Amino acid sequence: MTGAAEHDRFVGVLSATLGGARVDDLTRLSGGASRETWRFVADGRPLVVQRQRAGDIRDMMVEARVVAAAARAEVPVPTLVASEHNEDGSAFMIVEAIEGETIARKIQRNDEFEHARTLLPEQFGAALAAIHTIEPEPGMETVDQIAHYTEAIDGFVEAGTGRPQPMLELVRRWLIDHRPPTVDPVVVHGDFRLGNLIVDENGLSAVIDWELAHLGDPMEDLGWLCVKAWRFGQAPPVAGLGDYERLFEAYEAAGGHPVDPIVVRWWEVMGTWKWAIMCTLQASVHLSGAARSHELAAIGRRVCESEHDLFLALEGRW
């Protein structure tokens, strides 16, 4: 969104969507390649809107339905207020504003979250158990992640904008050789980690950013939460906050699927491999000149960090 005219137009759209409510204090919080996040007040009620740009292949209306279904499954999520898809492919979703913190280093270190840190591993397990009971929504898909990310990295190399990465090929073969048995798919969040969780002094307030929700193995979410990159420099494996056993026991106690630590470990390796490829692809956007960005360039430098983590994983030393 650029310019006062566009800002005012969007205020009008939001007001109309909310039945003529007075919209004040529309302020941008963050932005990404495919969407923007804004906070505003409608007739005195604090709300958040995520705005998806035209051209994004994901259907935000599926995400909106999943958020509503998550609330019905008693997952802590912001209340869905409204959603709208436009003819040009753009879309937006309005939810209630939840107070709290999402920045990992603050949650892990600040004194105000000392009590919350004692509760979070168990709360994460309970939230994931609830997520995995959500009724699938039309439009949700199951994706073979090995095939998907192999295609991504191969296409990157074939286009001449990347280079072969032997460590990623080694891990890909390990993943294929050790792939766990197929299970009946459930709804998984797809990006359950610090950064996508709102935390206050009492622990987990809300699970946000459902754009990657899909159908898959429930152990995927547990493994992704434990990926070394999402520990943000802290030693405990569960988001840098707790041990595996606390997460697994809380998950099962809340009605989650039986946990096989070996399968979770496979998904943890998969998540690290996937993150390395995602870093490579994001850096390529900068290196190709499509979008010059210090942030994207810095993310590219994290590929070697993930490769190091993968060496440790295969040696059983993380």
Image (cartoon, rainbow, N blue to C red):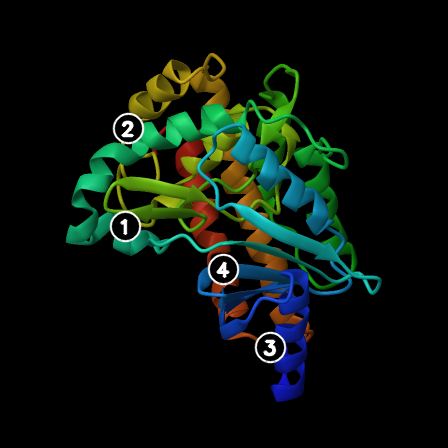
Q: How many marks?
A: 4
Q: Which callout, 4 or 2, points to the residue nearer the camera?
A: 4
Q: Where does label 1 land, which residue?
A: 107
Q: Residue at x 49, y 59 (%)?
A: 47
The quarter of the picture where residue 213 lies is: top right
Separation of marks 1 and 3 at Cα, in angstroms: 31 Å
In this view, the residue farthest toward the bottom is 4
Residue type of the residue flagged with mark 3:
Arg
On screen, residue 232 versus residue 140, left or right, reads left
Nearer-N-terminus badge (4/1) = 4
Mark 4 — residue?
A: 47
Q: Residue tagged by mark 3?
A: 292
Q: Earlier in the sequence, mark 3 or mark 4?
A: 4
Say whether disc 2 or disc 1 marks the residue closer to the N-terminus.
Answer: 1
The residue carrying mark 2 is 243
Q: Would residue 301 be visible to someone looking at this image? A: no
